């Protein structure tokens, strides 16, 4: 009987690109009851458009998708292979998850964008917890433009810093508005808080997820990952050994030059990026 195994808990990571979702996913998957599957919506879309290509991709377990102990169960389900309905594709993925890892396990989807949440909300008996991660606008500008430059042809015109700041504001505000308007259970954390105060923030994350916390979770040691799509960081071992902060913006950005022209963005940055208490760390 389809759907007899229900996933009790799904963690959905929502954010802009280059805002720390890969790091967050790696930290979460260090817990014995958590398994991470990367950007699941991309897997669903690839399955609908080019199933043969999806089967030949490599999972982070080092097996081809068609041979992966988890994904081969998904590929054997007609709901994933033939359905045009995203919610049905998720049902197939989640049923395979429960049969592979048990009902007490926690499924992590780092698709980031909002559309899959609409489909997930159609699934009955599914507890969805959303973690919204945001990066300081200054750090985001430098990492985002650096990534575009890396992928662009030499001499190509890059987006401007002010336009990138406006994009950051518009998209992060849209995510928060959606989560609040739809009454979703979510926890906000910033890349800065996670990297600079991991001993404060990582326990808060696992407390929010109702999962036991142990100090070794501060060390990145993903136990169960079956990712197919995601940030290139997941394949770079030297970046996956510890929680590190990308501080490139320190020497590349003069904050006052442009942010003083957009005070609403600066106000949003201060309110949303540094929203969690660090227990007056510096006043002790």
Image (tube, rainbow, N blue to C red):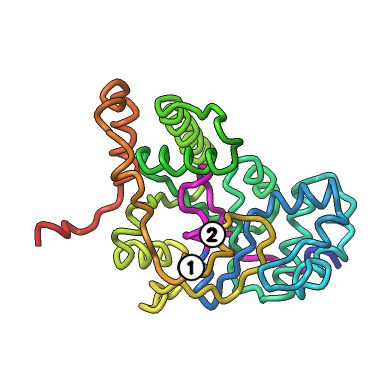
| Percent position of residue 45, x then y | 77, 47
Quadrant in which residue 64 is drawn: bottom right
Q: Are marks 1 and 2 in contact (CB under 8 Å)?
A: yes
Q: Residue furthest left?
A: 284
In the drawing, does residue 228 fall left or right of residue 200? Answer: right
Q: Residue at x 26, y 24 (%)?
A: 260
Task: Specify the label residue 233 is tagged with.
Answer: 2
Q: Is residue 166 above or below residue 243?
A: above
252 to the left or right of 256: right
Q: Is residue 192 magenta?
A: no
- Seen at 69% across and 60% down, the residue is 228
Q: Is residue 163 above or below residue 207?
A: above
The mark that comes first in sequence, 1 or 2, is 2
> Quick one: quadrant of the C terminus?
bottom left
Q: Quadrant of residue 119?
A: top right
- Looking at the image, residue 216 lies above or below residue 155: below
Q: Secondary structure at mark 1?
A: loop
Q: Is there any visible trace of residue 15 in the rendered image?
A: yes
Residue ID for mark 1: 240
Left or right, 197 with respect to 121, comes to left
Helix, strand or loop for disc 2: helix
| 8 in the magenta segment | yes
Q: CA distance from mark 1 to mark 2?
A: 7 Å
Q: Position of residue 222 (x, y in %)?
A: 53, 73
Left or right position of 262 against 84: left
The residue range painted magenta reads 4-25
Question: Can you say which quadrant of the picture contains the N terminus?
Answer: bottom right
């Amino acid at each position: 009987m389809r759907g007899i195994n229900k996933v009790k808990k799904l963690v959905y990571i929502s954010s802009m690109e280059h805002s720390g979702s890969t790091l967050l996913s790696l930290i979460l998957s260090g817990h014995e009851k958590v398994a991470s599957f990367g950007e699941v919506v991309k897997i669903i879309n690839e399955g609908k458009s080019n199933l043969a290509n999806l089967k030949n991709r490599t999972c982070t377990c080092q097996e081809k998708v068609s041979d992966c102990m988890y994904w081969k169960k998904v590929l054997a389900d007609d709901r994933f292979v033939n359905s045009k309905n995203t919610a049905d594709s998720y049902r197939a993925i989640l049923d395979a998850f429960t049969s592979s890892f048990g009902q007490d396990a926690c499924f992590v989807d780092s698709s980031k964008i909002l559309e899959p949440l609409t489909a997930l909300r159609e699934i009955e008996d599914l507890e969805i917890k959303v973690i919204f991660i945001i990066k300081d606008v200054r750090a985001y500008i430098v990492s985002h433009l650096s990534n575009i430059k890396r992928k662009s042809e030499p001499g190509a015109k890059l987006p401007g810093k002010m336009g990138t700041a406006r994009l950051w504001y518009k998209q992060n505000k849209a995510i928060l508005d959606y989560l609040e308007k739809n009454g979703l259970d979510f926890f906000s954390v910033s890349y800065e808080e996670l990297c600079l105060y991991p001993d404060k923030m990582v326990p808060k994350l696992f407390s929010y997820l109702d999962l036991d916390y142990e100090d070794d979770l501060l060390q990145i040691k993903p136990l169960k990952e079956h990712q197919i799509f995601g940030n290139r960081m997941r394949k770079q071992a030297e970046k996956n050994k510890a929680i590190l902060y990308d501080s490139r913006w320190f020497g590349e950005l003069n904050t006052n030059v442009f942010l003083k022209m957009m005070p609403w963005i600066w106000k949003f940055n201060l309110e949303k990026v540094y929203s969690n208490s660090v227990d007056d760390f510096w006043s002790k």
